[in-house]
Amino acid sequence: MNKMTSTSPLVLPSPETIEIFAKSNQIAAELIRQGIPTNTLNAIKSDLRYFFSWHAISFNEDAEYPIPNEYIVSFVTDHTARWDETSKSWVYGMSKKVRKVLEDVGRKGHDSTGSKTTNQPHKISTIKRRLSSLARAHEVKGYSRDSVYSAKVKELLKAGKNIAYNKPRKKEALTIDLLYKLIDCCDNSLAGLRDRAILSVAFFSGGRRRSEIASMMSEQLTKDIDAKGDFCYLWNIPDMKRKNKASDDFIVPITRDAAVFLQEYLKMAKIESGAVFVKIDKHGKPGKQLSSTSINTIFKKLQTRAGLDEMDLSAHSIRAGFITTMGRENISSLEIMHMTGHRDHATFQGYYRGSNLLHNPVLDLLKR
């Protein structure tokens, strides 16, 4: 084979070849998109909306792929917390002007814009997730994801991980006793019946995620009779974390109080099709489907009403609460995982909150 010399003519691909390459890239991008689970895809879209909003507001220009690394470094420093000895508080690099515009956009567009709605730095895990979404977008556009992760960016992320503000802190578990404190705060209005149903269904169907509760549809529910002869529902939950695999859907029972509360709510709201959990206006009229954010807002409202503000709880505490409650009742982890839908035991174990150190049952084994 002859080696190309410096005088060899440059051979450009033909227009037909360029068109084939373009179509191949489009097909590759579509295959990548279709292979991404629904929840993950929505998170990526939200992250990209946020990044491009921040870029446009910060630099008064639209970002273009590939994103120059100095902008990515600015993104990290604009959002990473650092301790300020003068004010004795956590601060971050974003200017007040950019911060205010992002907050205004976020409030007007809610969570659909991907914009900030609170005047706080990002957790380093959030920054990493947004950069991961940006790296995926680069791949889809035909660029290397390494263009996002320069040595400087990696160094900043590593440093940020060790800052106290970013140390992981798990939410407390909403165990069954605390669950009923929240349920008891629900009145008999339609909104109260809805909130009571949300809490009980989320807990007793296996500690469901907010996204699963928000996306529950009437068509996914089937009436049945449980092993004790009582009325129950069977809920066919689409697995939103793994896309285009019908076999990955799984069915969980909704029994006992949860079945009763859900039936009462559906009857009063006259919901026979479509979204189960919907907004209720001030006149008690059902409206549009609730979002995951709305579910958490309802939870925090009931937490305050129940006098549990001192506890570090969120709607995700229900998932930890179900696993912790069942674990303390000595239910096998395999049986619990069958209800929660966990595939990875290490992830599952991360939701278990052990008992108070001095009340740990292991201590009973130390008695003579």
Image (spheres, grey):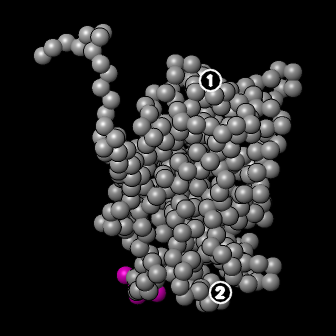
Give x and y (percent) for residue 250: 37, 68
Give x and y (percent) for residue 97: 83, 37
Whether residue 120 appears in this view of the structure is no
**Residue reaching furthest to the top:** 6
Q: What residue range appears in magenta?
A: 227-231
- In the drawing, what numbered circle is on residue 245? none
Of helix, strand and loop, which one carries label 2? Answer: helix
Give x and y (percent) for residue 260: 56, 83
Crowd tier of the residue under label 1, counting other residues whose Cα lies within 10 Å: few below 14, some 14–19, many 20 or above: few
Residue type for callout 2: Ala
Residue type for callout 1: Glu
Of labels 1 and 2, the one closer to you: 1
- In the drawing, what numbered circle is on residue 269? 2
Q: Would you name the residue on which mark 1 appears?
A: 70
Residue located at (45% from left, 78% from top): 220
Distance of label 1 from label 2 (alpha carbons): 53 Å
Residue 263 lies, with reference to residue 308, above or below; the image says: below
Of helix, strand and loop, which one carries label 1? Answer: helix
| Of the pair 113 and 143, the residue shown nearer to us | 143
**Magenta region, mostly helix, strand or loop?**
loop
Query: In the rendered image, which quarter contains the N terminus?
Result: top left
| Of the pair 165 and 304, the residue shown nearer to us | 165
Residue located at (69% from left, 79% from top): 287
Which image quarter: residue 346? top left
Query: In the rendered image, which quarter contains the C terminus?
Result: top left
Q: Is residue 151 magenta?
A: no
